Image: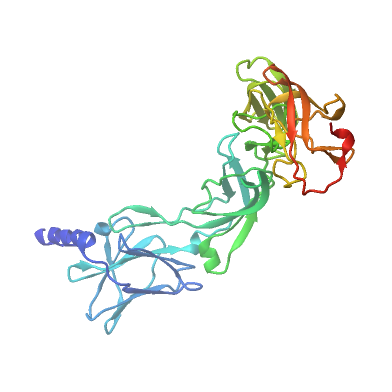
Amino acid sequence: MWKQNKWFLVCVFCLAVFPLFAQTYTVRGGSGEPYMIEDTRNRIQIYVVNGVENVEISYTSSLSSHQWYRFNTRFLDREAIPCSQIGNTSTIRDVQDGFGYCVYREGEMLNAVWIIDYAKHPFNLQSLHVSAQDPCSNQVRLSGEPALDDLYYMTPNGVRTAVPRELEVSFTSLEWDDDASYFNEVERTQNLASLGDVIDDVLIPTIFCVSGDRFSQHFRIGQSVCSDEYMPQGIELHIDTAQVVGIAENMSSAQSGLSAPATIRFSAMTNEPVATIFNWRIYRRDEPDNVLINFTEPEVEYTFTTYGDYVASIEVSDATGTCTKYDEISISIAESFLDVPNAFSPGTSPGVNDEFRVVYKSLVKFSCWIFNSWGQVLYHWTDPAKGWDGKKGGKYVSPGVYYYVIEAEGSDGIIYKKKGDINIFRPKTINDQIDSEGSF
């Protein structure tokens, strides 16, 4: 009894602390080359064979006598099995699916071998089904008929361990491009350890095709099976904005926020046709119940004319209204500002102080008149982003003093009435034609 217990303790000690050995077994047979997976941590090699009728396992060492054992739960519950011995090589036959095999040699257990007969657990799906993780999820799982067997082995210590089948699933989906602010339709492939693994980012109607598994591909008997078209319900949403009119060169940067009037195009970038129902709401942040606009299309434009903070919110739903996604974006409209220069030099250095322009922000109304000293109107404009180039009738006016009158209104309700003089500087060396009627 003591000898037997001592022998068990030696086995456990060997499993725990003996250094790993190089591959010690040779597995042959079945239809095609056996597929080997090595679990070095548990000192076991898993061989997947395609049929066990002619499979044999051999072991060669310097010793002439080997004792073989097999187990299907743990090594301590092993049973001795016969082998054929030729010289220093021993061989066992009649191996079975779902068993581990091992040589025990003078107090040390060598790496074990586990056999899986793939012919008994084939990838033979005839149909493929898709189900969502939850009704509004963009994640799905696949199942099939007939159900695929779980492949596993037992470690020598008795731990049941899965052998992934490693399937490949392909389907069509969308991919968000941050740089372009756009969804691109893409063909996706995802590797699955098993058929029930989660598949992410299923955004549009698609067909799933599963091919595999790695063992059927290895034995060159691989196949694929496809599902019916699957319609997801989960919503994917991004908001894209574009200012219809850009920032002018003479717009002040000292005030934070957009300059009114600011026309903004809001776009709901979604996974259509899953996303079907759209509802835009624009309101002042301090007055959420006072909705300025409701709009039921993916894209809407709105012109902000009044100083303050605003919210543009979008709610998108699928055709049933069951699945909804919400997002919002903040818009800040700046207070008004107006500053008027008193000199410029037209025609001297292009692009550098060669136009009379105000510096402004958030002017919703604007008019400016230029007069000569006799009160004649030389120029008039209504867009604060523009200005006067110092010409009348296509010709530069003479250097000197001219006058402006400005009437404007800001986004914050401030009324501006400004008037003053402008000095035009032009060196005598410039011989451009001068409109004398525009001068003094």
Residue 303 image-quadrant placement: top right
Left or right: residue 431 compared with residue 198:
right
Please tell me which residue lies in front, 51 or 189.
189
Q: Identify the residue shown where x is 26% and y is 79%.
A: 61
Q: Identify the residue shown where x is 69% and y is 46%.
A: 229
Q: Position of residue 118 (x, y in %)?
A: 49, 63
Task: Single out the residue that lies furthest toward the left.
Answer: 2
Left or right: residue 306 compared with residue 254:
right
Q: Position of residue 7 (x, y in %)?
A: 15, 62
Residue 319, compared with residue 412, is above or below; it is below
Q: Where is the N terminus found, in terms of image quarters?
A: bottom left
Please tell me which residue lies in front, 38 or 430.
430
Q: Identify the residue shown where x is 49% and y is 57%.
A: 165
Any part of residue 222 in sight: yes
Residue 278 image-quadrant placement: top right
Q: Position of residue 44 (x, y in %)?
A: 33, 63
Left or right: residue 27 compared with residue 10:
right
Q: Position of residue 71 (x, y in %)?
A: 31, 60
